[in-house]
Amino acid sequence: MLRHNYIKWFFIALLTFLCYAYFSAKLPLILIFIAIIVWLGITVWGSFDIRLNYFLKVHSSNKKVNRNIVALTFDDGPTEITLEILNLLKKYNQKATFFCIGKQIEKHPETAKNIIEHEHVIANHTYSHTNEMGFLSKKEVFNEIASTQSIIQQITGKIPNLFRPPFGVTNPNIAWACKENRVEVIGWNVRSLDTIIASEDKILNRILDRFEKGSIILLHDTSTKTLNVLERLLIIMEKKQIQSVTVDELLTIKA
């Protein structure tokens, strides 16, 4: 597990030493450049791999769970597909967590209410899901989270405690905004890549290859492709007596 502050101060100390050594003992300048490149590389890696807990604490699974349970999660809704997913989950008696985009909730308020009525959990996935998430200021990130908190409360009566940053990107500004909004950050340890991979078979196999007790599975309630994969997955889970629960139940935290 990497920690941003520890790494930062380590490299500051290292660069200070290298610079001193360079000016006093003619240490090769290339060593300083290598140290800077390594530092930047670790920082980029930490920014894009949410499981590293590099900038903030992230819940990505529960390996200590003693039940045969997982948590199915759906990002980027609600959409027209969300209702069909809710029906599938009801058919197979499974629960899930929906990380919803604020502007999508405004388009589909009744679907957001249906998520709650079906006893699933609705969570925060920012207002706009901007591609520039990693470059927003503290205030902009704060507003992305806070505005969606307000929208969810107005429409469903619930104040979410769970948040997932778009693309799993984290940085100091996002860490600050999460702390100020008092939300728990949720990652995943099984990424389906259902928005990238075209083949339903490949998506399903990717999930099953990484599937284990206590997993948090990332899916998207945005396409018929995912809907088809979900039904096949739920059939397999039923046969293996694997239960999907909401993220808060899996992690024993507040929803």
Image (spheres, rainbow, N blue to C red):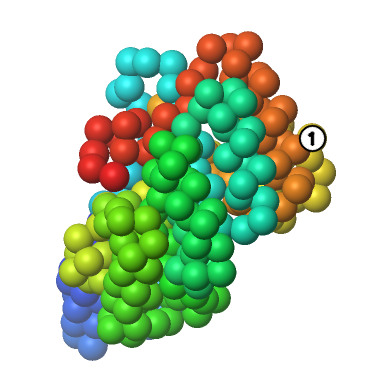
Give residue 234's position: percent from left, percent from top.
Answer: 63, 26
Locate the C terminus by quadrant.
Answer: top left
Q: Nearer the viewer, residue 2 or 159?
A: 159
Please rate how many residues cluster around mark 1, counting C-alpha atoms within 10 Å: few if below 14, some from 14 to 19, many from 20. few
Give residue 38's position: percent from left, percent from top.
Answer: 41, 67
Residue 13 shows up from this direction: yes
Residue drawn 69% across the image and 31% down it = 231
How many numbered marks appear?
Answer: 1
Choose top left, top right, bottom left or bottom right for residue 62: top left
| Three-letter code, disc 1 | Asp
User: Residue extending furthest bottom?
Assistant: 23
Residue 188 shows up from this direction: no
Q: Can you say whether 84 is above or below 15 in the image?
A: above
Q: State left or right for residue 80 relative to residue 155.
A: right
Q: State left or right for residue 223 relative to residue 210.
A: right
Q: Nearer the viewer, residue 36 or 157?
A: 157
Give residue 172's position: percent from left, percent from top.
Answer: 28, 72
Residue drawn 37% across the image and 49% down it = 186
Q: Can you say whether 32 is above or below 41 in the image?
A: below
Q: Which residue is mark 1?
A: 201
Q: Can you say whether 77 is above or below 121 in the image?
A: below
Give residue 88's position: percent from left, percent from top.
Answer: 63, 33
